[in-house]
């Protein structure tokens, strides 16, 4: 299929938004083009049919999400080739995401194309965003810094939520083993140029102790998420979009005997309150140009009991618990403001875009810790303020029916200030660091439609990232107040490239993607300097050298028969640091881990997947299987990499199978199924290292579900 003109892509989408001129306006089609193909926007910010997008984009649609009976964004992303979601810490089940081997701090997660998925939110956020609100998930791999800024080194995941289009609603109920229950409701009202959707999801889960060791493998959770989304057309000649979301999440884990006492040794109790609001406005200019404005605000509050403090107190200062006024939890509060504007110009074979974006993030944290030298308890706190501004430009040039070129660049400015303080008797009471960085990141994408069925694509780009705010690594060391960021920390830089080929037929689709990502001045955290130690900090951000990830992704989708579709995927990965990591050279264990430490941890050597759906009449049978190959993972005995008992372990492969059967009668759908059907669990447990998790910690969950549309 030859590539239609840019105008044919732009006008139907503008029409769907109510933005095109009346003479150009076809029937509304909010996420489909005139041929029924899904429209995607993440790769270029311009709408394209997925098969015709100049930047390769993968889509997880609502049907696939429903086949998994996914409750959350985390479950919706499970099993996606080149994307790995994982839980860490059996006492809190926090989650993170990796794209092509690059971890969460290097993957940008967007909500409706907006950067509100903050670092603090990301710790549990993948499990807090309800799947019932998701229309589709768009994934572009490789550096997207030319459009979205420094967090897009490894890829960009854009979560597109359901937009109100027609009046109606939906009620859903899922009942599963171990109290794995979900209640869903949404309703949409459309009148004239106004459409509003309200949604709510309540999720519950009981504790699971798979191996009977008295520690949680799955924590108890009680989560409520709700929101409103409205679209109002012909407001000042344009379309106004308003969105609000609220999440309240309560989770309890740790030792079963003390799980109900949030201040007990070995207990964790985490409460999260999060809300956000966004405003978007699209205004057509002339017959084909478009001006867009975006504003957003997100607020996150978290209280987490610090079992590390109680454990250290009993070991170093006890016996007996600390005074009641000392039993104060870890507290964090984060505010993030975003703003953006862009102007899209269509002139002949060119679609040109220029945009501005701004982000202001502030996070305040505090926690209680024990100084092992002074044998004294102290409170440590950090106040962080970050501003990031970006100016970007892009040209999508339709050279002819076969060739398309996308050329873009972004100028980013980063300025952050961090103040650390505590009441420790030794050292100065405060320590302040300031950080400023400017970076220019270009990107080039080429697309060649060799014939109506075969499309070749190539992309290359760079990125630059400054560590700021909160991250998964900081969570593992009980929060930022224990980790210092020095003034001389260098920003990470990245270069990425990919070449892909896609064959699309009526019944047979094949994809091949080769990728390479180069990271320089990789940021991690190590032992604190003497200056930071004097303030009571145990860790410090450091540059640990250069690394790369590379691999091959393959996919085959076949319509085997009229009602039977099968998809096969395979990924081969390789990720290495240039040099051995310092903690593992001349290790106290006497074992030579120098070569093993070059492997990027948690990157499977290979993965393979199968998805099949059979839909005779009113029935639907869905099966999904994901095989994860071996990977290298650090085991830090008692949380210390230089403990003589620490090891670098190569894991075994494992398989996860999900199955579901559903029947639809009029507006009612009944379903039953199982997640992790064959009860696969990680046998190698090392509870003294909360990060030593690479496979499921608990087994099969059988469920039944009811959905009613009205």
Image (cartoon, helix red, strand yellow):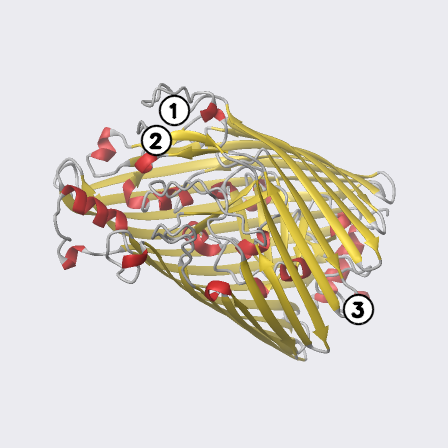
Element assignment for label 2 = loop
Front one among 67 and 349? 67
- Tell me if 400 is positioned left or right of 314 in this view: right
Say which residue label 2 marks: 641
Element assignment for label 3 = loop
Residue sitting farthest toward the front = 212
Q: How packed is label 1: few (under 14 Cα within 10 Å), some, or many (20 or more)?
A: many
- Tell me if 231 is positioned left or right of 297 in this view: right
Residue found at x 58% / y 38%: 100
Report which quarter residue 481 is drawn in: top left
Q: The C terminus lies in which quarter of the figure?
A: bottom right
* Residue 423 visible in the displayed image: no
* Residue 324 visible in the displayed image: yes
Say which residue label 3 marks: 617
Is residue 248 depicted above or below 559 in this figure?
Answer: below
The answer for how far apart the CA atoms under marks 1 and 3 are is 59 Å
Disc nearer the start of the sequence (1/2): 1
The answer for how far apart the CA atoms under marks 1 and 2 are is 8 Å
Is residue 421 depicted above or below 634 in this figure?
Answer: below
- Tell me if 316 is positioned left or right of 303 in this view: left
Is residue 180 depicted above or below 118 in this figure?
Answer: below
Cβ atoms under marks 1 and 2 closer than 8 Å: yes
Say which residue label 1 marks: 584
Residue found at x 64% / y 49%: 625
């Amino acid at each position: 299929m030859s590539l239609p003109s840019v105008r044919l892509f732009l006008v139907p989408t503008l029409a769907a938004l109510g933005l095109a001129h009346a003479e150009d306006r076809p029937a509304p089609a909010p996420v489909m083009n005139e041929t029924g193909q899904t429209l995607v926007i993440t790769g270029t910010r311009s709408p394209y049919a997925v098969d015709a997008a100049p930047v390769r984009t993968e889509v997880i649609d609502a049907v696939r999400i429903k086949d998994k009976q996914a409750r959350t964004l985390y479950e919706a992303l499970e099993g996606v080739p080149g994307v790995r979601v994982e839980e860490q810490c059996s006492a809190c089940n926090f989650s993170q995401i990796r794209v092509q081997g690059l971890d969460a701090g290097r993957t940008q997660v967007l909500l409706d194309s907006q950067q509100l998925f903050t670092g603090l939110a990301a710790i549990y956020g993948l499990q807090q965003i309800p799947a019932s609100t998701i229309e589709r998930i768009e994934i572009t791999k490789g550096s997207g810094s030319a459009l979205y800024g420094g967090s897009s080194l490894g890829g960009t995941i854009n979560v597109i939520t359901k937009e109100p289009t027609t009046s109606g609603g939906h009620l859903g109920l899922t009942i599963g083993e171990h109290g794995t229950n979900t209640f869903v409701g949404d309703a949409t009202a459309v009148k004239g140029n106004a459409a509003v959707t309200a949604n709510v999801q309540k999720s519950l889960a009981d504790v699971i102790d798979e191996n009977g060791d008295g520690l949680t493998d799955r924590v108890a959770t009680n989560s409520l998420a709700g929101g409103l989304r409205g679209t109002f057309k012909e407001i000042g000649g344009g379309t106004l979009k308003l969105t609000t979301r609220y999440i309240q999440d309560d989770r309890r884990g740790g030792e079963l005997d003390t799980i109900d006492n949030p201040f007990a040794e070995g207990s964790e109790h985490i409460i999260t309150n999060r809300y956000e609001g966004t405003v978007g406005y699209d205004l057509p200019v002339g017959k084909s140009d478009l001006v867009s404005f975006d504003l957003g605000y997100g607020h996150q509050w978290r209280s987490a009991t610090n079992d590390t403090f109680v454990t250290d107190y009993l070991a170093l200062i006890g016996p007996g618990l600390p005074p009641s006024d000392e039993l104060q939890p870890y507290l964090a509060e984060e505010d993030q403001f975003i703003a953006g504007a862009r102007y899209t110009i269509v002139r002949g074979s060119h679609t040109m875009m220029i945009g501005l974006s701004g982000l202001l993030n502030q996070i305040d944290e505090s926690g209680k810790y024990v100084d092992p030298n002074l044998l004294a308890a102290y409170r440590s706190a950090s106040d962080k303020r970050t501003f990031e501004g970006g100016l970007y430009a892009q040209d999508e040039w339709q050279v002819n029916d076969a060739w398309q070129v996308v050329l873009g660049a972004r100028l980013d400015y980063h300025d952050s200030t961090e103040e650390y303080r505590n009441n420790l008797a030794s050292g100065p009471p405060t320590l302040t660091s300031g950080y400023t960085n400017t970076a220019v990141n270009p990107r080039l994408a080429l697309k060649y439609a060799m014939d109506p069925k075969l499309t070749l694509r190539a992309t290359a780009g760079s990125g630059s990232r400054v560590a700021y705010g909160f991250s998964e690594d900081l969570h593992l060391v009980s929060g930022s107040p224990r980790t210092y960021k020095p003034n001389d920390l260098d920003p990470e830089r990245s270069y990425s490239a990919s070449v892909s080929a896609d064959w699309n037929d009526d019944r047979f689709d094949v994809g091949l993607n080769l990728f390479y990502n180069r990271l320089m001045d990789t940021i991690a955290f190590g032992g604190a300097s003497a200056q930071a130690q004097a303030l009571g900090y145990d860790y410090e951000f450091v540059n640990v050298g250069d690394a790369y990830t590379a691999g091959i992704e393959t996919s085959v989708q076949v319509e085997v028969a009229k009602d039977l579709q099968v998809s096969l995927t395979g990924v081969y990965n390789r990720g290495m640091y240039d040099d051995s990591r310092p903690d593992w050279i001349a290790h106290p264990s006497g074992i030579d881990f120098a070569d093993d430490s070059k492997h990027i941890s948690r990157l499977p050597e290979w993965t393979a997947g199968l998805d099949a759906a059979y839909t005779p009449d009113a029935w639907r049978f869905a099966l999904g299987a994901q095989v994860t190959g071996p990977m290298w993972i650090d085991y830090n005995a008692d949380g210390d990499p230089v403990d003589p008992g620490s090891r670098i372990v190569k894991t075994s492969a494992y398989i996860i199978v999900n199955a579901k059967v559903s029947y639809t009668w009029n507006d009612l759908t009944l379903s039953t199924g199982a997640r992790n059907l064959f009860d696969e669990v990680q046998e190698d447990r090392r509870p003294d290292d909360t990060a030593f998790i690479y496979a499921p910690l608990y087994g099969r969950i059988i469920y039944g579900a009811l959905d009613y549309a009205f």
